[in-house]
Amino acid sequence: MSSFVCWSLPITLLTLLCCSGSGEKAFEVHVSSEKQIVEATGSLKVNCSTSCEDPQVGGLETTLSKRVLEEHPRGKWKQFLVLNISQDTSLLCHFTCAEKQHSEHLNVRVYKPPAKVTLKLQPTRVSVGGTFTIECTAEAVKPLENLTLSLLHDRETLQNQTFGGAESNVTAIFNRTALTKDNLNFSCQAELDLRPHGGYIIRSTSESQVLEVFEHTNGTPIDIIIIMVSILLFLFVTSVLLCFILGQHWHRRRTGTYGVLAAWMRLPRAFRQRPG
């Protein structure tokens, strides 16, 4: 008899502990949404449910405005529409069953798409082998850890840059070298990948700009040759005129008249007569 008492006491205590633990986990609470990210000031449908057959009370707690779209006749589930979500927030779904309350959180993030993407090209004209810089800027994008800025040549991706940190205007700087004499067409693309949060990919592309590439010649450029020839011709003509003027002054000092005028006077009258 004493042996039975010794064995029954631990078994009874173990049974009570197991029953007590299972009582705390007697029902479950679930909160879900099609996505966990929403555009700033947007709305989100949230489902709140429980495994309790006859919950006493349940709902969704949030500081944001909400309204009930649908609900189970006995309150086992409810669908809410949460309105005007302007910043990251946490939603609390809770139910009370048999005087016990369980709850679950749903973290919702807010995104801002790259509405404006710009490209700055410096310089806009280089020789083959010359270097140039391209700046790609996207304004007020969120979340930055899901953003990629890409440099495109026509439709080909040349370089990428990813980001992190707080919301802000972001700029990617790409240094490149012109390898051909063909003009190059560049654009910047911002890609916001929201798939990890149940969303989709949002892309925005800047206006394209053309880099003018010219071939550098080893010899003297033709425009420099033309300039040099023009200068030499000008100097030659100027020197001839100066020599002529000085010669006439010298001739006048010796003879009292200009040599050209004397030669003109020596011509026959018929040649000197102006046409009427």
Image (cartoon, helix red, strand yellow):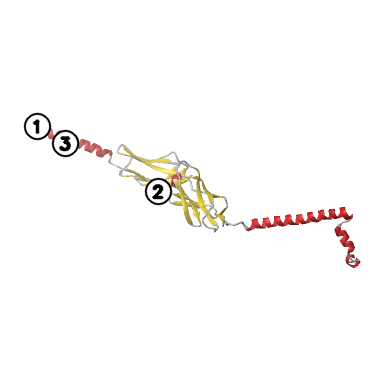
Q: Quadrant of the C terminus?
A: bottom right
Q: Which callout, 2 or 1, points at the residue further toward the start of the chain? A: 1
Residue located beneath label 1 in the image: 2
Residue located beneath label 2 in the image: 196
Instruction: Tell me where residue 28 appears, x and y as whole percent.
Output: 31, 43
Q: Nearer the viewer, residue 120 or 52?
A: 120
Q: Nearer the viewer, residue 155 or 262?
A: 262
Instruction: Tell me where residue 196 appears, x and y as whole percent.
Output: 40, 48
Give the residue drawn at x 85%, y 59%: 260
Left or right of 45 in this view: 226: right
Amino acid type, residue under disc 1 in the picture: Ser
Instruction: Tell me where residue 207 appears, x and y as whole percent.
Output: 55, 53
Amino acid type, residue under disc 3 in the picture: Ile
Q: Nearer the viewer, residue 156 or 52?
A: 156
Left or right of 19 in this view: 32: right
Q: CA distance from mark 2 to mark 1?
A: 63 Å
Give the residue drawn at x 76%, y 55%: 239
Q: Nearer the viewer, residue 194 or 80?
A: 194
Which circle marks residue 11 in the picture?
3
Give the residue drawn at x 44%, y 41%: 88
